[in-house]
Image: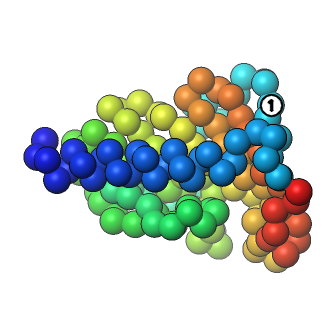
Amino acid sequence: MNIYKKSNTILLSIALLAAMAVAVPGLSGCTKTSENVNTSMKNRTDNTTSNSVSYFGSWASHRIPFVPTEPISQEEAKKRQAYYVGYYNSSKQLERFEKYLDGKLEWQDKYVYWDNEKLKNRYMIKADGSETIQNFDRDGNIIK
């Protein structure tokens, strides 16, 4: 791996940690559950069927839901140390966003939307099964 790619991966990891630090338990709008969640892509928040799956090399901004960038093929994704997978519903809303590192699921975000297309819930699930939930009002503002 050349130095550019390695430093890019490190910077991306730091940015991700900073983004997730905003949503730690005990801060406004977050709840922590101790239930062990099934991270095999099927759990109680999968109440809709994804209509499309896309692979990405990165994401932009600390906006929630994440904004995936650098579209890549599935074949290219599998060659990388780190990549992201986005699942979209029929309204083209991001329902699930996953990070893979060394071929293993590292974390995933799942999103549920109000009927007005604003974000209702964000489920942040780590590889160990721990889950943090953020709730949003009908205008998309985090509930404190």
In this rendering, the answer to whether 127 lies above or below 14 is above
Q: Position of residue 143 (x, y in %)?
A: 88, 59
Q: Position of residue 138 (x, y in %)?
A: 88, 71
Residue visible at 69% across and 55% down in the picture: 111
Q: Is residue 56 left or right of residue 20?
A: left
| Furthest residue in direction left, as rendered | 2
Q: At x 16% / y 53%, what residue is drawn?
A: 4
Residue at the spot x=30%, y=60% of the render?
A: 72
Is residue 81 toward the left or the right of residue 34 in the image?
left
The residue nearer to you, when weighing 105 against 5, is 5
Quadrant for residue 137, please give it: bottom right
For image coordinates 54% across by 38% down, the residue present is: 107
Q: Front-most of 142 and 41?
A: 142
Image quadrant occupied by the C terminus: bottom right
Q: In the visual, does 106 lie left or right of 45?
A: left
Residue 93 image offset from top left, x and y in percent: 62, 68
User: What quarter of the picture does the N terminus occupy?
Assistant: top left
Answer above or below: position of 77 versus 25: below
Residue 35, horizontal then vertical, whole percent: 78, 24
| 47 or 71: nearer the viewer | 71
| Residue assigned mark 1 | 33
- Does residue 76 appear in the picture of this structure? yes
Dot 1: element = strand
Look at the image and name its color scheme. rainbow
Q: Residues within 10 Å of mark 1 (few under 14, many from 20)?
A: few
Above-or-below relation of 140 to 28: below
The amino acid sitting under disc 1 is: Thr
